Image (spheres, rainbow, N blue to C red):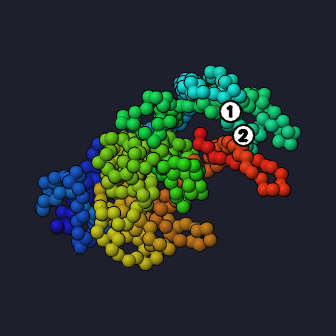
Amino acid sequence: MALSSRRRLCDQELMDVFEDSGSDVESVAEESTDSDVPGDLSSETDATSYTDIEEPVVVRTWCELESLDQAPPPRFPFTGVPGQKRNCDHNPLAYLELFLTEDIIQRIVEETNCYAAQQQGAPLSRLSRTRRWEPVTRDDIWLFLGLIFLQGLVGKPLQKWYWSTNRMIATPFFSCVMPEYRFSLIMKFLHFANNQDFDEATHPAPKLKKIWDIYQMMVGNFRDAYTPDRDVTVDESLMAYKGRLSWVHFIASKRARFGIKSLMLCEAKSGYIWNSIVYTGKGTTFGPQFSEYGLATSSVLTLIEPLLDQGYCLTTDNFYTSPELCDYLIQHKTDCYGTIRPNWRQLPPAFSARRLKKGEIIAWQKGKMMALWWKDKRDVCILSTVHNAATVHTTTRGNKEVDKPQAIVDYNNHTMGGVDRADAAMTFYSAVRKQQKKILQKNFQAPPGTVHVECLCAVQTEQ
């Protein structure tokens, strides 16, 4: 293909991207002078016909950049109105009611009473606590949840110790709010869904059948209560859990290591969790309209779908970042950038074939996308729709001055830490506690000449 044809192609691609948004792209289209770079063709879904090109071209082409100081592509205009949607006047209870609404509390009341009624049909021993069960009300559930929250602040190894009368460990407030037997019975029968209504063939998430409806209600409340700022982040989070569960994950880089993995979309500045998906393995539910994409792309698009066409800027790590994700987001007026694995097949063929010296930078442009490769202690590759390949002067932790690409500085210091900020905020309140234990008495025959004793076996039970 002639060099002049490539130049017209790159300019035309930028015009096609911004023709609906009214953005000025004259300063963005940079002429490439490298005539040895072969054109890398994308999938047929991006096919575009250009009548002013000498040779027939099917799709957009990666063009290597000789000048690293060209103007960055303009951002899509941000049309969102970030901030809290309801004024709570700094009332903690009002903030809590934004997420635990009366509909959720009423659902918990109904399902808890229903499950207790189902269990009371079974034979009970004469001294069983279940005989003292009384149907719960909304006030009971609020008191119960209040004590649960308080247990996260006042840590004790055993639940019964919160009602202990021993002056060394006593916490009198708990017994003033609710008797211990009442709290234990609510804990025993606490339920969020009717087991008899479960149908594995039609349920959208069979592995989450116990909490699915309540979880969806709470996620909707998180979205309705707050509108995030322009910069958002998608990453994974791990909640510590070592019980019996078929979809417990091991992530060595996380502090918990073993736990339940969630995919989260958070505001980069505050860490507010705006949307989330509990990852249960193969049966994880994503948007059906994204079924043609792989796991990484479909999970990101499911999380960010309500924010599309509003000018948001998404930051992801190398597991999620891909040219196909950027293409879809650009079509819906959403910017993105993040680290990327250099062996993606849709990247320039020469992207991973070269060997760079420390501090060297090479970059390619394709429409609004810029692929950058920088050599530091190791290779760092980043894909962005809002950056150029320009560098800035920064100081490392060891007070060493280096030149880094602006895209990498923004990624490390400004936008990628959204989920990490959410995890850091949750560490101040430990909501995950050890499961309750049952004490089973087992008598055994003592050896001759010794005193008969009882062996107490602590058996871990699932809730």
Q: In the visual, does 269 lie left or right of 440? A: left
Is the N terminus in the top left, top right, bottom left or bottom right quadrant? bottom left
Mark identifier at residue 213: none
Q: CA distance from mark 1 to mark 2?
A: 9 Å
Q: Quadrant of the C terminus?
A: top right
Checking the image for residue 159, the label placed there is 2
The residue singled out by tag 1 in the image is 184
Q: Position of residue 302 (x, y in %)?
A: 39, 43
Q: Secondary structure at mark 2?
A: helix
Do we see residue 419 in this rendering? no
In the depicted view, which residue is nearer to us: 442 or 222?
442
Residue at position x 60%, y 30% in the image: 189
Looking at the image, is 268 positioned above or below residue 250?
above
Q: Residue at x 32, y 45 (%)?
A: 290
Element carrying mark 1 = helix
> In the shown orientation, is residue 367 left or right of residue 276?
left
Measuring from the top left, give residue 443's x and y in whole percent.
Answer: 73, 46
User: Does the CB distance between marks 1 and 2 fall below 8 Å?
Assistant: yes
Residue type, numbered disc 1: Ser
Amino acid identity at mark 2: Gln
Q: Where in the figure is residue 78, as x and y percent of width and height?
A: 42, 42
Which of the marked residues, 1 or 2, is nearer the chain's N terminus? 2
Task: Check the image and report above or below for 463 versus 244.
Answer: above
Query: Residue at coordinates 46% horizontally, 76% vertically from top-left?
Result: 358
